[in-house]
Amino acid sequence: MKILHKILSICLLFVVSCTSTEQRELAKTKAGQYLDNSQSNAYSETDREKYIDSAYFELNSSFQNDSITRYLYKRTLAAYYNAGEYEKSLKVGKDVLNMAAEVKDTLEMANIMYRIGDTFYAKSKIDTAFYYYDQAQKFYEKINEPGDLGEVILYKAYIYYNIGEYVFAEVEGIKALSKLQNSNKPTQVYNCYNLIASALDGQNSNTQAINYYRKALNQVDKLREEGYGEGMIRYNKAACYNNMGGVYVKEGKHKEAISLYRKALNFPNIRKDYPSLYAKLLNNMAYAKFKANDERELPELFYESLEIRDSLENQSGIVASNIHLGEYFASKKDTAKAISYLKSAYRTAKKIRSHYDILNSLKLLSELDKENGIYFSNRYIKVNDSLQDIARANKEKYARIEYETDRLIDEKEELVKKNSFIIGVSAVILLFIAAIFIIYYLNSRNKELLLIQEQQAANEEIYLLMQEQQAKIDTARKDEKDRIAMELHDGILNNIYAVRLNLEFSNKKVDEESIAKRKEFIKELQTVETEIRAISHDLSRNAMLQQEKSFEYALEYMITSQKNDYDTLFEAEIDKGIDWENLPSTCKVNIYRIIQEALQNINKYSKANYAKADIKQVNNHMEVTVTDDGIGFDAKTVKGGIGIKNLKKRAAALNGSIEIDSEPGEGTTIKVTFPI
């Protein structure tokens, strides 16, 4: 299985190394360039690792969470993994997992969990690896990714195999195979066949194991589709021959086993390129020859294998060679040598925690070592029981991991449902509150519109009133003209005509009586002169009236025509420089109403002898001041009535301000200032 894990590492490196147009574009960035450099053999291992660190630093500094950034994080994870920096790989993996969760990318979350599982597997923390594989499996099942799902199930099957759960390993391997067969992943299909065969071998289902090893062998040539060279093809074929040979040895078919071992050993460059596999083939062929009572090349083959394994420091291989040498010398009745090799195997097996080899060496030692046989026998029983307990605990632990993973997913889904319900209820409440606010706003707006309509109606009423008043003024002016015309025609002209005739008649006489009459006629002319002056004066007043602006006159007339029970004298002073024609009608209406309201308050309450309304323009502002010398009031304590409120509203409508200055016995001054 360790060989299979190495294949996994090679596959991961190959997948990450593939280039595409997008990757070439990413290589232009700093992080991408650093990662490219980390894969170049032109740099030392130390420099390559520094490049990976620099890439990680650049990514951390970017504070971005887009697809390109996450892709570079995944490259960084793989680079650390392939460099054997598993702790750094895990740190990067957890970073990008959080990023994928943040954007709710289920496929990316599954892929990262899968890679984190690989890293824990490489660290021999297989229970944690199993947890992440199981999490990834659940995500892949949700999004229906059969290829990736098959791979992650396969690696769960590896874990079951490593803890000796061969039935579970077989079941998971077959499940993985069903997902991978149509996914165009020949390497993983090959791994499935090998794993299923190994699991069947572990259950002593020899015939079925051979069948699956043959399927794996037939799959080897397809590995070229994924870029494997001829050397790797030969390696995988040799591994298949070795595994099949082991099954044949168990069945007692030693010749078939030896034939397969020789075929594997005869592959070109097998010793040079894959010395560990070569040593294994040598040891297994020697053991098959030993079991077949073929003494040729024995024990030299055992020694050669052990020597290679010692040079490679292949601890598990050294244990296997020592056990086989122990069995060989035991058959030769060389008990001392046999015990020596078996004890060496036992010590190394304990060091590397190879449970199978510990039991095997203890069993052989208990049979050979007469002095310490009971000790080794007891140790065998104790270790065997302990291993069974461990196997039982492992079975329960991994079952619990799967159960808890399912439970956590169910709880998460339930939480999502609850959150959705809470969000839905909150949305309804917010909509309800929004509806209330909108209704309140619309009601307020309607009231405002009604007030504006009322104001417009009042303005129209005032305008009509002013038009009516102007019509009356025009009528009075016409009547006055007609009266003067009649006076001129019926009175003065007739008198002048009569005087003219009398003067013509009397002008012919020079007696005293005629002179006296002429004096009377002159007096009559003086009387006519007086009448003409009076009419001229009236006409002059009428002309002046025609020159006055109508609104100004209306204001002056309204002010000066006020009457009340206190015989208050009202006076108006209006700035002649005010351009009333260009002043908006709403402004004129409000001025009219302000003065009218102030005068009404004077008539009702002030008991004034004198009141004055002063209207003037100061720069870009209009000032309307109404003053009286009445009884006054305390402006600080007396609450304003409707009249005062109306004045304030009128001032606000003009975007202006109002000042009320009054003291008891000191009269009152109301001043409104607004921009024009």
Image (tube, rainbow, N blue to C red):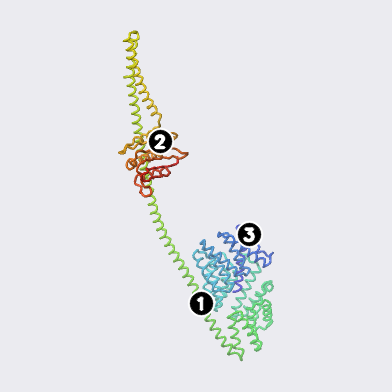
Name which residue type carries label 2: Glu
Which of the 4 quarters of the picture holds residue 674?
top left
Image side of residue 121 versus residue 524, left or right? right
- Residue 257 appears in view: yes
Which of the 4 quarters of the picture holds residue 248?
bottom right
Circle 2 sits in a helix, a strand or a loop, which is it?
strand
Mark 1 vs mark 2: give the one in front. 2
x then y, percent, for residue 101: 52, 63
- Residue 450 appears in view: no
Image side of residue 177 versus residue 503, left or right? right
Circle 1 sits in a helix, a strand or a loop, which is it?
helix
Q: Which mark is residue 30?
A: 3
x then y, percent, for residue 355: 58, 80
Q: Nearer the viewer, residue 604 or 6?
A: 604
Circle 3 sits in a helix, a strand or a loop, which is it?
helix
Vertically, is 456 above or below 258? above
Q: Residue furthest left?
A: 565
Residue bearing mark 2: 573
Tag 1: Cα neighbours inside 10 Å, few (<14), some, or many (≥20)?
some
Residue bearing mark 1: 395
N-terminal of the pair, mark 3 or mark 2, is 3
Whether label 1 touches label 2, CB < 8 Å: no
Tag 3: Cα neighbours inside 10 Å, few (<14), some, or many (≥20)?
some
Q: CA distance from mark 1 to mark 2?
A: 109 Å
Q: Nearer the viewer, residue 314 or 262?
A: 314
x then y, percent, for residue 482: 33, 24
Q: CA distance from mark 3 to mark 2?
A: 83 Å
